[in-house]
Image: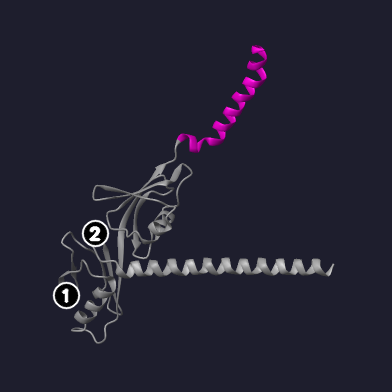
């Protein structure tokens, strides 16, 4: 009896340790993914087509949201024409602080970069979306309402500059680290007819087999 109780206790402890280890691994993976996402956003560079939202604290006339033109330039209040492409958001923020320090004492400047991403195909809300640099492909699909019932997670593409990039959802790194650029088109393809109607196809097949067994075979005997 005592031996049985010991076995039960040991089994419970083993199960508890296993669960704790799994939770720790899951938490570690989540922290790693978030760190990777932030690192990708920090390394991203401003590109033509991006929206640059500039906010100067207590200076509404200096605050504006601008679209980077094809030359990589924007026109800023008081500063005028300025090339901003190939800079990170933090680098541009530091540059603007220095430039606006000519007019203001210790200016507080915030810079947000938004990218224009079109989502097409088998999603619930296909549209053009403005997304910040921390958003992954999965985040954008969620923003578009997620993949519809007829959509396939195996057929997700990015069309960029006339080229088609296919992403594998089984490789989570591609969803976490693929940098989205203004002008990208995310396309979700449709599942095959059989995939969408597998239950009815199986039911039809079973009915056909039953018919053959019950009706056709007795006639052949």
Q: Is residue 68 among what the camera can see?
A: yes
Can you name the residue that lies furthest to the bottom here?
105
Q: Quadrant of the C terminus?
A: top right
**Residue 156: image x %, image y %?**
38, 48
Q: Nearer the viewer, residue 86 or 4?
A: 4
Q: Is residue 54 among what the camera can see?
A: no
> Which region of the structure is painted magenta?
193-221
SS under mark 2: loop
Separation of marks 1 and 2 at Cα, in angstroms: 20 Å
Instruction: Kindly indicate the quadrant of the structure image that contains residue 38.
Output: bottom left
Q: Quadrant of the N terminus?
A: bottom right
State how many labels appear: 2
Judge depth for marks 1 and 2 and give the one in front: 2
Q: Please say whether residue 214 is one of the residues in the magenta stretch.
A: yes
Give left or right: position of 24 versus 165: right
Vertical order, 38 against 185 (above or below): below
Residue visible at 24% across and 87% down in the picture: 105
SS under mark 1: loop
Return the disc, 1 or 2, that comes first in the chain's sequence. Answer: 2
Q: Nearer the viewer, residue 79 or 31?
A: 31
**Residue 120: image x %, image y %?**
36, 47
Q: Label 2 belongs to which residue?
A: 49
**Residue 104: image x %, image y %?**
23, 84
Q: Please say whether residue 74 is one of the residues in the magenta stretch.
A: no
Q: Label 1 belongs to which residue?
A: 79
Can you name the residue that lies furthest to the right here?
1
Give the number of the disc on residue 44: none
Can you name the residue that lies furthest to the front here?
3
Mark 1, Cα crowd under 10 Å, few <14 / some 14-19 / many 20+, is: few
Give left or right: position of 202 versus 116: right
Residue visible at 20% across and 69% down in the picture: 84
Vertical order, 141 against 38 (above or below): above
């Amino acid at each position: 009896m005592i031996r049985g109780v010991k076995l039960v206790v040991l089994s419970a402890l083993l199960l508890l340790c296993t669960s704790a280890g799994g939770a720790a691994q899951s938490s570690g993976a989540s922290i790693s993914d978030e760190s990777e996402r932030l690192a990708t956003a920090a390394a991203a560079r401003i590109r033509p087509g991006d929206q640059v939202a500039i906010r100067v604290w207590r200076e509404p006339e200096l605050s504006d949201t601008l679209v980077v033109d094809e030359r990589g330039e924007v026109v800023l209040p008081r500063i005028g024409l300025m090339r901003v492409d190939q800079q990170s958001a933090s680098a541009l923020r530091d540059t603007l602080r220095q430039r606006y320090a000519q007019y203001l004492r210790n200016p507080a400047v915030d810079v947000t970069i938004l990218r224009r991403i079109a989502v097409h195909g088998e999603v619930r809300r296909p549209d053009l979306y403005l997304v910040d640099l921390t958003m992954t492909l999965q985040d954008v699909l969620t923003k578009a309402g997620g993949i519809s019932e007829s959509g396939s997670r195996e057929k997700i593409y990015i069309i960029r500059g006339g080229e088609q990039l296919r992403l594998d959802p089984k490789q989570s790194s591609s969803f976490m680290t693929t940098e989205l650029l203004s002008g990208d088109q995310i396309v979700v393809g449709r599942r095959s007819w059989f995939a969408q109607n597998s239950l009815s196809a199986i039911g039809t097949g079973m009915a056909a087999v039953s018919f053959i067994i019950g009706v056709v075979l007795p006639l052949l005997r």
